[in-house]
Amino acid sequence: MIFCGIDWAERHHDVALVDDTGQLLAKRRIGDDAAGYQILLDLLAEHGDTEDNPIPVAIETSRGLLVAVLRTGRRKVFAVNPMAAARYRDRHGVSRKKSDPGDAFVLANILRTDMPMHRPLPADTDLACAIAVLARAQQDATWNRQQMSNQLRSLLREYYPAALEAFAPWQNGLCRPEARELLKLAPTPAQAARPTRAQLRAAFRRAGRSRGIEAEAERLRDVFRFPGLGIQLGARVLAEIGDDRGRFADARGLKAYAGSAPVTRASGKKHYVGRRMVKNDRLNHAGYLWAFASIRASEGAGTHYRRRREHGDWHAQAQRHLFNRMLGQLHHCLKAGELFDEHQAFPSLLEVAA
């Protein structure tokens, strides 16, 4: 009997033929195209392959065009697990050397010595094979979508946390067409505050949504406009400062309570400015998260942070300075009953100069 082993690859395949004594009869490298398949069939025919008595083939995969060509007729095709093939390779040498022609020779010898221990691929109809290709492609697409969604979620958590908050109420939020349209409309935190309600409604319609557009556009408008303080951090800040608006006489009291305002010690010629050690640790921790998220969620906050770094502040100092400024803005909004305005909170350099 003649046995065939094929080492499969994406662009080419190595073929080896052995007889029942293990003697190598032929070896050939073929391309992964129609011409290569024809060379393989001619090689098999030269060594006695017929329709009634086809040469069995061992290969390390059960899918692909090459396998489909080999499975035509009465030929037995054996899909050998690559790990099992590696164990057989150790029987032919101890140096652990590996090559594609050598792997094809090993696969052919697997059939020569242990063909009864392996099961050939089932003789499915063409329709069943076509369904298998489509079903596996759909499943692979689902897995790839989830993998890319996890990668996008990780990136957004670092760069664009407001987007995650916007998509959180939706089931499979990042995989929905609404999320793709909104990321096209506002791909960066700085651009997130610019879309109008009409633009948000138009994005929902392009995604194929027809219900709840007004409410979702209003919700996203609120999410994207305030820099970095989402539901969870907002609850933490509210829990620590309370809802009694007369608790702090001025913004300085709130800043001292949060630990964002520095402590100044002056005596004679000595002058020291350092961070405050006595503070509300929970509010201080929430403030650092708030400032960190705002650096990328707000163009003005990011500019303020970079200006402080250029001034010589460390990263933590610049964050604390930004937190201190935003606490003053929060105190003003609560006292005056006004909504946050990005342009008023962080005016541009030209406006300041004017």
Image (tube, rainbow, N blue to C red):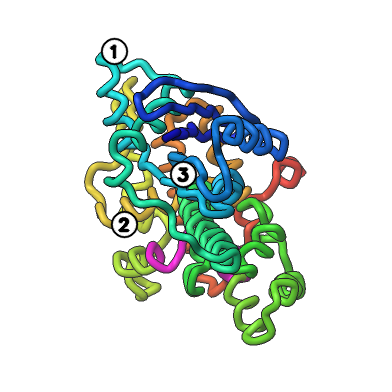
Q: Quadrant of residue 31?
A: top right
* C-alpha gap between disc 2 and disc 1: 64 Å
Q: How many marks?
A: 3
Span colored in magenta = 221-234
Q: Earlier in the sequence, mark 1 or mark 3?
A: 3
- Which element is circle 3 on? loop
Kind of residue at disc 2: Leu
Q: Is residue 30 above or below residue 293?
A: above
Residue sticking out furthest to the bottom: 211
Is 226 included in the stretch rendered in magenta?
A: yes
Q: What is the number of the mark on residue 283?
A: 2
Mark 3 neighbour class, 10 Å CA radius: few under 14, some 14 to 19, many 20 or more: some
* C-alpha gap between disc 2 and disc 3: 58 Å
Residue 244 point in image, percent of width and height: 35, 75
* Disc number lying in front (2 or 3): 3
Q: Which residue is mark 3?
A: 61
Q: Residue at x 46, y 37 (%)?
A: 318
Query: Do labels 2 and 1 touch, CB within 8 Å?
Result: no
- Which element is circle 1 on? loop
Residue 319 point in image, percent of width and height: 44, 41
Kind of residue at disc 1: Ser
Question: Relative to the observer, which residue lies in front, 47 or 335?
Answer: 47
Q: Residue at x 36, y 42 (%)?
A: 81
User: Which quarter of the image is occupied by the C terminus?
Assistant: top right
Kind of residue at disc 3: Thr
Q: Residue at x 41, y 28 (%)?
A: 19
- Which element is circle 2 on? helix
Q: Which residue is mark 1?
A: 95
Mark 1 neighbour class, 10 Å CA radius: few under 14, some 14 to 19, many 20 or more: few
Mark 2 neighbour class, 10 Å CA radius: few under 14, some 14 to 19, many 20 or more: many
Query: Do labels 1 and 3 touch, CB within 8 Å?
Result: no
